[in-house]
Structures are given as C-alpha cells and as structure tokens.
Image (spheres, coloured by chain):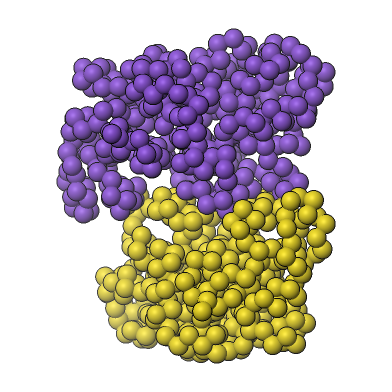
Chain colours: A purple, B yellow
Amino acid sequence: MALKVGLVGYGTIGKRVADAIAIQKDMELAGITSHTYNYRTEVAKRKGMKIFSTNGKEDFEKNGIKIEGDFNALLDDAEVIVDCTPKGIGASNKENLYVPQKKKAIFQGGEKASVGDVSFVAQCNYNEALNKDFVRVVSCNTTGLCRTLDPINKKYGIESVHATMVRRAADPWDIYHGPINAVVPVLELPSHHGPDVRTVLKDVEIFTTAMSVPTTLMHMHSLTVDLKKAAKSEEILDLLRETTRVRVVRNAERVRSTAEIMEFAKDLGRLRGDMFEICIWEEGLGVHGKKLFYLQAIHQESDVVLENVDAIRAATGFKDAQKSIEMTNDSLMVNRF
Amino acid sequence: MALKVGLVGYGTIGKRVADAIAIQKDMELAGITSHTYNYRTEVAKRKGMKIFSTNGKEDFEKNGIKIEGDFNALLDDAEVIVDCTPKGIGASNKENLYVPQKKKAIFQGGEKASVGDVSFVAQCNYNEALNKDFVRVVSCNTTGLCRTLDPINKKYGIESVHATMVRRAADPWDIYHGPINAVVPVLELPSHHGPDVRTVLKDVEIFTTAMSVPTTLMHMHSLTVDLKKAAKSEEILDLLRETTRVRVVRNAERVRSTAEIMEFAKDLGRLRGDMFEICIWEEGLGVHGKKLFYLQAIHQESDVVLENVDAIRAATGFKDAQKSIEMTNDSLMVNRF
C-alpha cells in the first residue's frame, strides 16, 4: 500500500521533491500546497497534482485552478509531510500543526538543526532517522560536504578540513537577487556549513568560509583535507567513483565548468536538467603527503531531492538504507546515466 | 518505411535535432557525426546513437566510443542529411559531398541564403520547400520574427517593421564568449536579420538593429509594426494565441523574465528545458492607432529544431504542411503543455 505524502511549499526544492515522490512505487503524492497562483501552480495542475491553498481560493479559481481544500485538508489526507517552505516557516508549521496533529514531517536545511530529531544525509546516517517523527534534511552545501567527506573519513581518517564555499548568487529564476557583478565575502566565521556538517558527521573537525559569486548554476567548494593516513590521488578517485550520489567528471571530456555540468545533465535527459550528484573534477583532485585537495560542484536546486525521498522512508520505518538509496537512485536515473 | 536521416554536426542545435528525429514515427536516425570525443559524444553513445567520425577513430576508441565509419559511411547510410555544422562548413559540405553524391540536405541559418534552394519557416512557406534538394532553415531570430509577423501581415497588412534584437551573449555552455558585463552594439546597419526575414516573408518591409547583452538564456526582440489597418491589442493577442509555435505568456503568472520562461519550460518536463515556442508577453503588447508594439523572447537553442524536422519532410515530398507541423508539435509537446 503506497504511503500518502503531502508536500508543503511548492518552490525550487518542493516542486522537485513532489515530482520525485510521484514516481516512487511505494509512495503516492497526496497533494501540494500553494500560496499564490503562478506558473508553478499551473504546471502542477497540468501534471494532475491535487492543489491545496494556504491562502484562500479566489486567486486560484479565477485562473482556472481547482483547490481541494486548505492546509488542514492536506494534513488530513497525508500520512507524512515534506515541508519545503522558506526558512523559519517549517519550524512554525511544526509547532502549530505537525506536533498537535501528530504528523511526521521532513524539514529542509534552512531550518535550525533543532527542528529535527536528527539531521540527515541518507548515505551517512540513514539509520539514525529510523522511525523518527521529525527529520531535517541538511542544506545542499552540507549534503555535498557530507557525501564526499564521509567515505574519505571512513577509509583514511580525517584530522581536519578547511573548505571554501563559493556560492551561486541566486537560483536561475530569481531575477531580483544579486550580486550580478561582484564577489561578496560572507562575514560569518566560521560559516554555518562547518557546524552543520557536524550535525551529521559528528567526529569530523571542519572549518568553512564562504563567498557569493555572480552565477546561478551551481555552488563550488574548494576543500583541503588533512588525512590521518597518507593516500594516493588515484585511490581517492576510485573511492569517490564507487561512492553513490557522487560523480567524478573530467575536463578531458570537455566538462570544464559548472555550465557544462548543467549542459551534460540536460543532455542526459534529466527532468529539469538536474544534476543530483556531487561532481568532483578528476583533474582537480590532488594529494601532497597527507594533504588532500579537491574541487566539487553542487547543484543547489536538486541534490537534496534524493535525501528527502530517503528521509520519508526512514521516518516511516523502512529499515533497509541501502535499498532505499537504490530505489531513489533508480527512479531518478542516478548512478545509471 | 521510416526515412533514414543523417545528422552532421552534433552541437547545440544538432544534438537537439538528432533527439527530435529519433522520436518521429516516420523517421529513423541513421547516425551522427562527431569531430572530437566529449561529453556530448558520451551521451550519444548512452542513447544508442550510431556515431560516425569526421576525424579518425583513435580519440574516440581510447574513450570507449565505437565508431561506425567516416563521414562518407554516414552519407551512404542516410537518405537525407541535416547539416548543423558551424557557419560556412555546411556550404563546403554541400559542394564537396552532398552535390556530387546527390544527397538532399537541410542547412542552418548560419549559412548564406544561397546555400538553399529556399529559406524555410514551416508555418510560413512549407510548400516552397516541397521536393527541393537543399533547404535552409533560417536562424533562431529570423524564425522568431517570421512566426509572429506572418499572421499579423496576413490579417492586418504590414506597412513596415522596425525590430531591435537584444541578443544573448553566448549559449549556456559557452564559457569563453562574452560580453559578461557590457552591452555591445552590433554595428551592422541594418543587421542581417531584416534582410533574412525577407527571404521568407518577401513582401514585408523590415529594418532591424541589434545588440548583445550579458545573458545566456534567450534573445529578446522589441518590435514596432506599422499596420495597414487599425487593430485592437486583444484581437492581436487572440490571433497570436491561435498561432502555432507561438506562446502568449503572462507577467501575472509570474513569468516576468526570460529566466522564468526557461524555468517554466523545465517544470513542464521539456527535454533539456527547451522552449520551442516564441514567447510574447500579454502585458507587453500594445496598439496605438495603426502602430503595434510587442516584446518577444526566443530560445536560441531550440526554436529551429521544429523547422528542421518539417524541412526534412518537405524536402522529401511529404505534401501536407499542416499535418507535418502537427506531427512535429505532438512529438515535442508543443501546443500541448
């Protein structure tokens, strides 16, 4: 019997998670919430999704959108909620709705860690989220750091990490957010990403600094890792090639930039051209003694979609982490194409 | 019996045309040509396309790509060729290969008009291309101008047009092409687009000027049209809504920019997030007496894909223009989603 999942907050992440839920064989999308009529709602209608309004019916109905009910109606219909609302609203929804109505919920990384009983990256700590009521999927950047650092830590041991997070200025659709012609240092030391990694990889010492640059496509991380044991770059590349949800790309294949990673994902036929995997350049990884350097690119719009799907399974008691990861990967062509 | 089509030049347009040919019920993709190994070739392999090399086998084979033969081998296998090579190479291929080997070919708008027996926009002059040996699909910009001006000319009569072409600087993958922080006037008066429109719409007087701006997503045209008869803006919007391969978009739906048109196309599930239709803003169209103003956005990577498919049918004697346009539209979700 398919699990009925409600999707609250149909934005950049929410719309992707909704599509991903809709194609899981063990799940059914109970519906989505929308606040105002726009092209995203229009698409949801055309895809046959049930639409619940957090803001009345009038604006929707005059644009030809049928509203199934309000937020509470979706809560009644759904067995579990994925909350993809903007930062802070998830915590408020939890207190006002999910706790009183005893509804399990998955939150996003914009929320504070305390919103969840656990912070979650499927391939690192799936089991910690088993049967939990509230699971927080960490942010796109933290997910990227965890996916690549965890296998390195397990094989070589990590003494410490410094990572520079070079962040895209805005998402592609976001036309009133800059910078468009400057590099902006993020004057938060350390940036929140390092502490956030430690909510998942508790024994990894990591310090992060960040800046914003004028691009919309992907984030880029430059990592310096002090290993406990010496390693060879080919061994580490092999380790990363075997790691799920990580992709080693090659400049030699003309994947020279984040732009070409996005082009590659479009060519592969991914829905929306999404690159769910963390991409590491083969030619950009090096080792000097016990010091490892690498560059990785993170598709901020999509990497956490995979984690949301797995988090639903973990929270609702699906015990086999490996199997969940494979089911999610298969449905979205990860590790295949 | 499916028509065997060979695709020469697997770049931005070529890879899209190849995918479009592969899904036509009346066509079969005989194969593609490639010059060097790269991620595009890798994708073609994964999609099961036959790959022919214009540059030897070694570079491909060491990267695990099977080469079916050289350019001549593809010419032997294919009944008709779509040539999507860079500007000038099409004309040289015509002279050296297609004419001597009596092979029909479709060319792109980067070639001079003289490369074709006819310049082509399916909904304007399909019949002129019937059974021709060489058909030139006009450029993305010219296609956009023809698709919207033709119905207006037929209904109201056009005295004259001035269009300002605000061109995207480079395609999304093209990382070494600017401008990235300037507006560059194109000092060619008139720009080549106006005369190019007249290769298709022979009786439309049109003058165009152009500039490049720092974006990769779409071109934008600002048109001023002097009509022979007075019109109302709602009538013209209705006319454009009924015109195939044109889409009236609305700021009221939060489609405020080219970025959001691209986001809309991604959300709709279009392969690569392509927007094949010319997009006109409902709120950006106005009439003052006999003067019509409108803004339209052109997805430079994809609008001509539709024309290439129809041009193949016209050149090989498929007589029903309307039917060809419908078959192409249906296969690519145009006018449906």
B303 w.r.t. B106: above or below: above
Image location of residue A74, percent across then percent down: 22, 33
Q: Quadrant of residue B285?
A: bottom left
Q: Can residue B95 be seen in this view?
A: yes
At x 21% / y 17%, what residue is drawn?
A100
Is residue A209 rendered to the left or right of residue A156?
left
B258 w.r.t. A248: above or below: below
Is residue A111 rendered to the left or right of residue A254?
left
At x 45% / y 46%, what residue is drawn?
A173
At x 36% / y 17%, what residue is drawn?
A131
Is residue A302 rendered to the left or right of residue A71?
right
A321 w.r.t. B33: above or below: above
Q: Is residue B214 visible?
A: no
At x 37% / y 39%, what residue is drawn?
A25
Q: In which quarter of the image is residue A8?
A: top left
Q: Which of B288 and B227 is in front in this view?
A: B227
Q: In which quarter of the image is residue A150?
A: top right
Image location of residue B132, percent across then percent down: 58, 89
